[in-house]
Amino acid sequence: MMLKGKFWLGIFIGGLSAMVLIAAGAYAFRGMIAQINFAGKPEIPAPPEQALSEASKLAMTEVRQLVEADDQKDFEFAERGFIATRTDPLIRNAKGEVVSDLSSYDFLKGPTSNTVNPSLWRHAKILTRHGLFKVADRIYQVRGFDISTVSFIDAGSGWIVVDPLTVVEPARAAFDLVTANLGEKPVLAVIYSHTHGDHFGGVLGVTSHEDVDSGKVKVIAPDGFMEHAISENVIAGPAMNRRVRFQIGGTLPRGPEGEVTSGLGPGIPHGTVSLIAPTIIIKKTGREITIGDVKLVFQVTPGTEAPAEMNFYLPQFRAVFMAENANLTMHNFLPARGALVRDAKAWADYLTESIRLFADKSDIMFAAHGIPRFGQKEIVDFLSLHRDAYKFLHDQSVRLMNAGLTGSEIAEVLELPDVLARQWYNRGYYGTMSHNAKAVYQRYMGWYDANPANLWPLPPEPAAKRYTEAMGGAKKVMDLANSAVEKGEYRWAAMLLNHVVFADKTNKPARDQLADVYTQLGFQCEAGTWRNIYLTGAQELRTGVLKTPAGMIAKDLIAATPTPMIFDFAAVRINPDKAISRPFKLNIELTDRKERHLITVENGVLIHEQDIVDPEAGATVRCTFPDLLMTLFAKAPIGIKAAKGDIVMDGDSSLFEALADVIEPVDADFPVVTP
């Protein structure tokens, strides 16, 4: 989850993972995480000072006691093997612009702020410990430079680099740190564990197209990598990109009153996204590959945390790499930014397979986020208890669903058994029991809960006006909300005030009152994602939607995007009224890709067919793929391109203009917390 500042070029989670073209530019999206290209990050207003309420303090009593009783084992694992970190905390791009500031989380070195859930504060301190660490003989990691972790395996004559972060600059900084402390060696191979952008986007920071093309460097990825890395969020990308701002707190100031990590790792730096296509594809569990003098044994785990994902085992080191299938937090089955619901049962089943294949043979476990685990028993316990949390969540959600409970009802009553809940790595810093239970329900049953009243409800704005009127008007509802706040009933207060705001978005007192409620809910949250969502909602209620500049998509990602995906994205942006008023057919020949495409616009839809030429089509257009993107999506003037010879048209040249006209631009800043 291009962002995960998690934004700027926006995945996108982890993500930032797929690339999405929008409006006059492009956003990069992670399947964890998307990113808003905050090279020109908007000026972020400081939130008004707001103290933690007594009700919020009381709500955090239990978790505060858990933190006070912490055995500090995770901190010891996080610190073990530390070698060095950068002397300059600022990582810059080629222009000298800062893309990441490793000191931005230094506030966590102080005493726990009462505006942050103490469990999240503890977790964030572990996630943001940055530097080069020795995991085991010949296995190293650079952590804290990005939302993800990059691993370096010494293969004798060179390095195997695993998951080279989200953007080039931190990946290069990590490699420089390794070289400075461990000596200069070439990269022999790069492994992408899965399809999310924070695990491949920095690849050009550790190798080059030339070295891969020449065969000096192998790039290894799971089956389906290119398809899913590009496509996972293309069609719904603009909506996901808007929502990801909430999930990762991309417009929040970093600090005790704002963003305190994403819950999965530090915030994603803004920088240069890259991609090199794999040269070796892993299709089956048990596949063995030797790089240098190191043997790797792979386990493919499709449909778990990512559509294409894999773990691997290093027998000579008794070490297992668990990709993003096992984390320092409960993961999410359905990201708050949106995505297809992940298969909780498959996830648990593949962890069972991992335990069977590797656990009793491993003394070291490391992964793509978080910290390593040390000791065979520790690894077995971790994988077993982590697996059991996902299996319990799946099985009990389905049991309650079959007993007649709806998704929201299941989420309200389902809790992990204490033996699972007391494990820090099963707590909901990134995914939550509540959100995941609803995701399991949605995977099996969809959005409809079978109650006829919910089959055809009023949309939010007219419903809010009716509710507000029925409760006696805005003033009455706001008074009810005040009473709820005094009792510490913030969830109910939020529901009440949301109706008032959606009934009248100009009601500033109601907006401010709701922002205060969201702030208290955010302060209480153990989940970094939920904290970011509430505080971003409060920010937008107070200041409006911050306008974010569009960042240009990386050329590697453009080159890797199949043309049919581009036309699929165009099809979901068709203005039906315009499309119905003027049906047409258009042949498009992409001269650089040597492709032919037939576009049919009729009955309000766009139909795309590849390798088809219709002699009866109204026109034929010949251009390059970049020019196609610039004219259809960035709205570059077609006439100027045609006059320069970049676009050649036979037949009715107005049809290409008509195609561009029916593809609507996307408003990347649509309202969320107001109508």
Image (cartoon, rainbow, N blue to C red):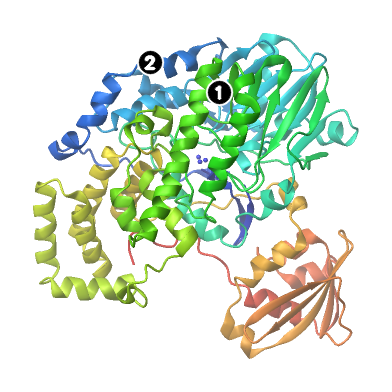
Question: Which quarter of the rendering shows the N terminus?
Answer: top right
Closer to the camera in the image, 341 or 525: 341
Distance between mark 2 and mark 1 Cα atoms:
19 Å
Label 2 with label 1: CB-CB less than 8 Å: no
Local SS, label 2: loop
Pointer 1: what residue? 143
Q: Residue at x 80, y 13 (%)?
A: 156
Q: Is residue 89 visible?
A: no
Q: Residue at x 68, y 51 (%)?
A: 228
Amino acid marked by disc 2: Gln
Local SS, label 1: strand
Closer to the camera in the image, 412 or 251: 412
Front label number (2 vs 1) = 2
Amino acid marked by disc 1: Arg
Place of residue 338 in the rendered image (x, y in percent of width and height, measured from the top left): 49, 55
Tell whether 662 sits left or right of 340.
right
Query: How many residues crowd mark 1 within 10 Å: few (<14), some (14–19), many (20+)?
Result: many
